[in-house]
Image: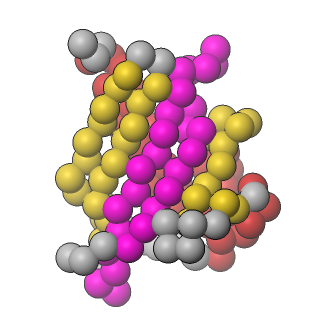
Amino acid sequence: MSDPADIEQLNTLNTAFIEACRLGSWPGLRKLLSDWFRYVDGTTGQMWDMAEYIADLEAHPDPTLRIDQVIIHMAGDTAGVTARTSNRSGTHNRYLDVYAREPSGWRCVQACVWPTQA
């Protein structure tokens, strides 16, 4: 059974992650990520290095980014957080962020975003 405190913390981290994406803020996002973080482009399947991920984040802030259908699934010291996103331009995506419990707390170790139908 999932600890409600862990679910609450993961939900808070998810909200902070989305806010960093809205702002295109690397400083806001950096504190949420593990040193082992990797990003998978769900459209191409390409694994991005950290420099590419940071450049994309900073070049594409999305202040109209909204989320719904948030689901948090825990399995021991690992958790998946997924949600559907949308923005003013009508783009819809789904993401899956994988978190691991590290000595410093929950940190995102991998993220993947892919396009969906509305």
Q: Is residue 80 above or below residue 104?
A: below
State which quadrant residue 90 falls in. Answer: bottom left
Front residue of 85/38: it is 38
From the image, give the main secondary structure of the stretch colored magenta: strand
Residue 58 visible, this angle: no
Count of marks overlaid on the render: 0
Q: Residue at x 34, y 48 (%)?
A: 82
The residue stretch that appears in magenta: 89-115
The N terminus appears in which quarter of the rendering?
top left
Where is residue 15 drawn, in percent x and y? 39, 46
Where is residue 99 drawn, in percent x and y? 50, 33
Q: Residue at x 65, y 76 (%)?
A: 59
Front residue of 5/69: it is 69
Q: Is residue 98 above or below residue 94?
A: above
Residue at the front extreme of this rendering? 45
Q: Residue at x 48, y 39 (%)?
A: 98
Residue 55 visible, this angle: yes
Q: Is residue 93 magenta?
A: yes
The C terminus appears in which quarter of the rendering?
bottom left
99 vs 71, left or right, is right
Where is residue 8 drawn, in percent x and y? 32, 26
Q: Residue at x 35, y 26 (%)?
A: 74
50 vs 68, left or right, is right
Residue at the right extreme of this rendering? 51
